[in-house]
Image (cartoon, rainbow, N blue to C red):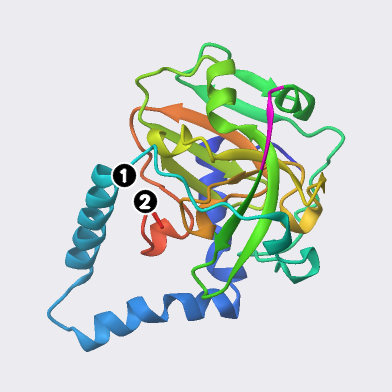
Amino acid sequence: MEKLQPQEHVKEIQKLAMSKIKRRELLKLLPIGAASISLPLFNESLIKQGLSFSDWVSETLYNPNQLAEVFTDSQVTEFKKFPYNTYDKDDPEVDLENWRLSVEGLVEKAGDYKLEQIQALPKYTQNVRHICIEGWDVIGNFAGAKLADFLKMIGADSKARFVEVICADYYYSSYDMASCLHPQTLLCYEMYGKPLDRGHGAPLRIHMPTKLGYKSCKYLISLRVSNILSKDKGFWEDQGYSWFAGI
């Protein structure tokens, strides 16, 4: 896959988004559309202001020490019952052998990182609930390095406010730094004791059990640390979804 610069990647996403959107994604947007019809006094600007205020409140009240519930192995959902769920396609055909995570922004050690370098960090395994905004949830087994440990390894600015990611399937999102430093936020490379398969985001995904599922980006190829959030905050966020998306 040809490597795109962040700005080019987002433009490509925006160009492809509506042509590739699936029926289930259209169904997700119905509540927003219904609100605009049933509440004619609320225009798009007011709706966006309301979402921004809600995100601000959620971020302000966020407790970085509050953990998501963890479960025993016997409570974990069977792997075959963990849905493959994407906005576009289940396999963007990542070249797994030559995959690299490109790191840039407010870091001391920008560059491309191999999966082996991430796997060399302490490994953590957790059984946590994954909640999809479509209405389903499962208890999954996830393993990987803490995103906080990786940010420390690359010398991320301790005062930086945001982390932005781009994925091989043209998905993208962004996060507040506090959520990235949460002890349960993983750069996940294993599920159920095995390397991620292609449907679940191989070779690397973010998993955040403190947020809704659409913030757990798959097929990571780029990570940027910044103090200024880009205009393009996230694929679904730019279409009206909550940016903070806390649970």
Label 2 environment density (alpha carbons within 10 Å; few <14, some 14–19, many ≥20): many
Quadrant including the C terminus: bottom left
Q: In the drawing, what numbered circle is on residue 92?
A: none
Residue reaching furthest bottom? 38
Q: Position of residue 188 (x, y in %)?
A: 67, 41
Label 2 sits on what residue type? Phe
Quadrant including the N terminus: top right
The residue shown at (73%, 30%) is 100
Magenta stretch secondary structure, dominant:
strand
The residue shown at (70%, 69%) is 83
Q: Is residue 82 magenta?
A: no
Q: Of the residues tagged 2 and 1, which is closer to the observer?
A: 1
Disc 1: which residue: 62
* Residue 104 figure quarter: top right
Disc 2: which residue: 244
Residue reaching furthest right? 97
